[in-house]
Amino acid sequence: MKRVRYQPCKFCKLQVRTTQKKCPFCHKYLYDFIKEGVNFDRNKEIVRLKKNGSTLRQLSDDFNISQERVRVIYNDFKDR
Ligand SMILES: [Zn+2]
């Protein structure tokens, strides 16, 4: 079973599931999935969460990517 976690929407500040791509309240994209360089915001968020103590496994579950991918993203984005 997947854990459900919440974070405040960065636009309307209501609690939204971390796996939601689009806020159900204000209908804005939480990550810039549709932009070129698509995953930049997501990757920064992964770095932020990992620095706050999230494990590779948690991040892997939350973002639907492999733990190895989380590790690579972290190493790539941690200094940006
Ligand atoms: Zn919102």
Image (cartoon, grey):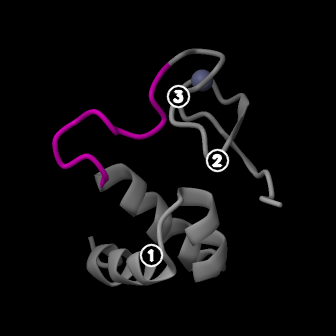
Mark seen at residue 44: none
Q: Is residue 45 visible?
A: yes
Q: Tag 3, which secondary structure?
A: loop
x and y percentages locating residue 54 in the rendered image? 65, 76
Residue highlighted by disc 2 = 18
Q: Is residue 15 left or right of residue 67?
A: right
Q: How many numbered circles does the render carry? A: 3
To which residue does mark 3 refer?
22
- The residue closer to the viewer here, 7 or 34, is 34
- Which sits earlier in the primary sequence, circle 2 or circle 1? 2
Q: Is residue 42 magenta?
A: no
Sequence-wise first label, 3 or 1: 3
Q: Residue 1: horizontal and vertical position, in percent?
A: 83, 61
Specify whether residue 34 is painted magenta. yes
The residue positioned 53% from the left and 59% from the top of the image is 64
Residue 54 showing in the rendered view: no
**The residue positioned farthest toward the left in the image shown:** 36
